[in-house]
Image: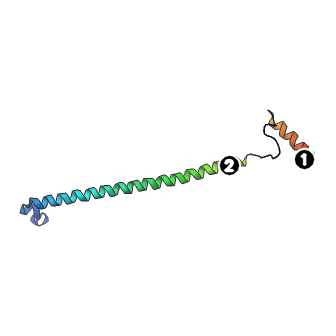
Amino acid sequence: MLAEATPLKATGDASGETVMLMELRKLRQENTGSFRELKSSLHQGYLLEREAIITAKCDDMENRLRRNNIRLYGVPEGAEKEDMINFITDLLSTSLEF
């Protein structure tokens, strides 16, 4: 039974063993290259997915920051001087005529 499993050893065919070793090395090189390509593409897909998640979070944070701001049109920049609260109070009371 052992002779059937390894006919090259039983016959002593050294050139057959050499050919087989060369084919195995070739197959190994092909598999190694394919594995590197697959690993690279998976890594790139992961990075693209992470970029999309981080971009969405950044957009959400920017939008949340804008919600807390009030825009006043027609008021020159720096008109509030150093006291923003009193400036806005006076501006609203004169504009809305309380």
Give the class, few, some or many, for how many residues have Cα within 10 Å of label 1's Cα (few <14, many ≥20).
few
**Which mark is on residue 86?**
none
**Which mark is on residue 64?**
2
Q: Residue at x 81, y 41 (%)?
A: 76
- Identify the image quadrant of the C terminus: top right
Give the class, few, some or many, for how many residues have Cα within 10 Å of label 2's Cα (few <14, many ≥20).
few
- Who comes first in sequence, dot 1 or dot 2? 2
The local secondary structure at tag 2 comes to helix
- The one nearer the camera, 25 or 67, is 25
- Tell me: residue 48, above or below residue 84: below
In contact (CB < 8 Å): disc 1 and disc 2: no
Kindly identify the amino acid type of the residue bearing the numbered disc 2: Arg
* Residue 87 sits in quarter: top right
- Identify the image quadrant of the N terminus: bottom left
- The one nearer the camera, 16 or 60, is 16
Kindly identify the amino acid type of the residue bearing the numbered disc 1: Leu
Residue highlighted by disc 1: 96
Q: Give the left or right position of residue 34, taking residue 91 as reference.
A: left
- Tell me: residue 80, above or below residue 33: above
Q: Residue at x 88, y 39 (%)?
A: 90
Q: Position of residue 96 (x, y in %)?
A: 90, 47
Q: Position of residue 22 (x, y in %)?
A: 19, 58
Q: Residue at x 83, y 40 (%)?
A: 88
